[in-house]
Image (cartoon, rainbow, N blue to C red):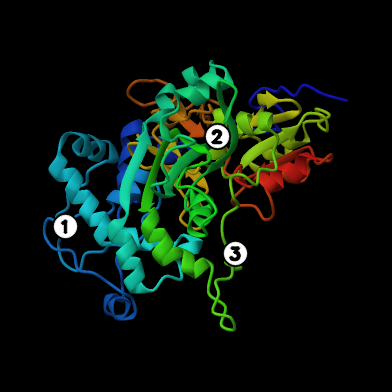
């Protein structure tokens, strides 16, 4: 039996007052909440400064030095902690300002690129499974020859919904090309952040055969074949930017000289190269695609591959019992945090629930930092006390997975701003039941195994669950 699953936000409430808050906490309206946001953003003091410096590798920042630019541009967590050992005056530049300065000033772009090369590039290369065993001298040579490149629009969410109106072929053709099938094999491509669509020519267009994301490689198989004398210096597949992708390109000559000997070590007994992959951990190859083409296009075209906790529902198994919604409500004081309907492909549906994205564009414009990524498990959360109800996050979310709700007191009265008398709003969304033990309540409650929360990059897991 196939059931079309549709429900309104709030369906399945278990009782009590919807979105109840303590009026004392927000009695001053927006201004008080903004002051609380400033207080919450104050940084802690390190009580054992000398011990930390003695036990960790540290670098002293001098006047005019910069830090945090890589994390800001990639909208990802910082790779290091920075603290002041004396009164320090800082200038904070938001990522939009960095983007514009890099666009308008060649000197600033060269400065940030030099800074990345001097610090973060080696670390990023070490994170790639096939490069982590390189000796320091080899890594220095590889890093020196590596180029920093990007394709697409960092603010890809602006045109996202217009793109969805196109058919699959037009969506593919509209994506910026990084490599075309048949191009000269000039290097190994490593994604730093973002997503790339892997394609192969089909008829008068291109067919999606996979995608790659952070620390995954493109072009390695072709370079190996050339190194073994079995193929030409030519890419066999194409690669396009899905929205935006930032990547490294290591010249083929450096890969063959320094990297491949680590993957294919010579046999101690014969002195010959072993033409079999060493058992080093590595990402799944994009061509090892367990999903059918229609499902793959569905995930990539809708950019659900951005989600680390996508709510997939199998509409063949779903009986519309709404146990998932009731469980979510029970876990959140009677207030469900998702809408049980969404885009569908065959019997696979992606519900309107926060996906806790790899690239959470909802965080871009929040003026108080209320919406943030948890540093321990990467879950995207909203600090209810510092949210001022501006709706920037809700408007920025490409997937419409954040709701603005009126908050009420214990008697059910809407709480209003003391000055404007306008009802106060709060942003709400799925928090993956972070304060509850076990899996998300919605998934645990489904009696038919019709719902799962899954990282969309885990293609094999998703394919197994569908089957």
Mark 1 in CB contact with mark 2 (< 8 angstroms): no
Question: How far is mark 1 from mark 2, CA to CA?
Answer: 42 Å
Q: Which mark is residue 65?
A: 1
In primary-sequence order, the first of circles 3 and 2 is 2
Furthest toward the right, the residue is: 1
Q: Nearer the viewer, residue 394 or 334?
A: 394
Q: Is residue 14 visible?
A: no
Task: State the SS at label 1.
Answer: loop
Task: Give neighbour class at mark 2: few <14, some 14-19, many 20+ (Cα, 10 Å).
Answer: many
Q: Quarter of the image containing the N terminus?
A: top right
Label 3 Cα neighbours within 10 Å, binned few <14 / some 14-19 / many ≥20: few
In space, the residues marked 1 and 3 are separated at their CA atoms by: 43 Å
Disc 1 or 2, which lies upstream in sequence? 1
- Residue 199, disc: 2
| Element assignment for label 2 | strand
Measuring from the top left, give residue 148's x and y in whole percent. Answer: 31, 48
Which numbered marker is on residue 277?
Answer: 3
Residue 175, image quadrant: top left
The residue mark sitting in front, 1 or 2, is 2
Q: Position of residue 332 (x, y in %)?
A: 63, 41
Residue 211 x/y as whole percent: 55, 40
Q: Nearer the viewer, residue 244 or 335?
A: 244
**Residue with the most extreme left position:** 63
Q: Is residue 127 above or below residue 287?
A: below
Q: Is residue 203 left or right of residue 135?
A: right
**Residue drawn at (52%, 19%) of the image:** 170
Tell me the distance, in whole angstroms, between the alpha carbons under discs 3 and 2. Answer: 24 Å
Give whichever of discs 1 and 3 has the lower sequence position.
1
Q: Who's the residue at 12% across and 55% down the image? A: 64
Q: Nearer the viewer, residue 453 or 111?
A: 111
């Amino acid at each position: 039996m196939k059931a079309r699953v549709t429900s309104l936000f709030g369906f399945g409430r278990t009782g009590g007052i919807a979105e109840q808050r303590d009026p004392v906490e927000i009695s001053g309206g927006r201004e008080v909440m903004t002051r609380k946001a400033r207080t919450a953003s104050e940084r802690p003091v390190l009580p054992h400064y000398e011990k930390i410096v003695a036990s960790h590798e540290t670098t002293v920042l001098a006047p005019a030095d910069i830090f945090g630019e890589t994390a800001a541009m990639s909208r990802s967590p910082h790779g290091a902690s920075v603290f002041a050992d004396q009164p320090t005056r800082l200038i904070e530049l938001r990522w939009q300002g960095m983007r514009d300065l890099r666009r308008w000033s060649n000197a600033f772009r060269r400065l940030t690129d030099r800074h990345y090369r001097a610090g973060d590039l080696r670390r990023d290369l070490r994170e790639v499974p096939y490069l982590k065993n390189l000796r320091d001298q080899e890594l220095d040579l590889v890093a020196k020859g590596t180029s920093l490149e990007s394709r697409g629009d960092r603010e890809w969410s602006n045109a996202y919904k217009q793109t969805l109106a196109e058919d699959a072929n037009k969506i593919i053709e509209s994506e910026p090309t990084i490599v075309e099938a048949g191009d000269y094999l000039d290097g190994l491509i490593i994604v730093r952040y973002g997503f790339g669509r892997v394609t192969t020519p089909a008829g008068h267009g291109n067919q999606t055969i996979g995608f790659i994301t952070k620390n995954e490689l493109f072009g390695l198989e072709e370079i190996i074949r050339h190194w073994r004398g079995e193929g030409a210096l030519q890419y066999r597949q194409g690669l396009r930017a899905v929205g935006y992708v930032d990547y490294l390109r290591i010249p083929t000559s450096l890969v063959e000289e320094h990297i491949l000997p680590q993957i294919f070590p010579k046999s101690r007994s014969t002195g010959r190269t072993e033409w079999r992959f060493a058992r080093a951990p590595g990402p799944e190859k994009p061509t090892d695609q367990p999903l059918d083409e229609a499902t793959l296009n569905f995930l990539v075209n809708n950019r659900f591959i951005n989600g680390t906790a996508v709510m997939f529902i199998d509409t063949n198994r779903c009986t519309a019992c709404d146990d998932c919604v009731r469980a979510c409500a029970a876990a959140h004081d009677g207030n469900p945090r998702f809408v049980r309907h969404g885009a569908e492909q065959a019997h696979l549906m992606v519900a309107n629930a926060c996906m806790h994205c790899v690239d959470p564009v909802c965080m871009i414009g929040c003026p108080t930092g209320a919406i943030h990524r948890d540093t321990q498990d990467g879950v995207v959360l909203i600090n209810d006390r510092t949210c001022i109800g501006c709706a920037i996050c809700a408007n920025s979310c490409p997937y419409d997975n954040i709701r603005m709700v009126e908050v009420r007191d214990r008697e059910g009265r809407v709480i209003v701003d003391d000055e404007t008398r306008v009802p106060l709003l709060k942003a709400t969304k799925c928090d993956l039941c972070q304060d509850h033990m076990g899996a998300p309540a919605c998934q645990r409650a489904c009696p038919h195994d019709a719902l799962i929360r899954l990282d969309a990059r885990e293609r094999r897991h998703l394919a197994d669950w569908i089957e």
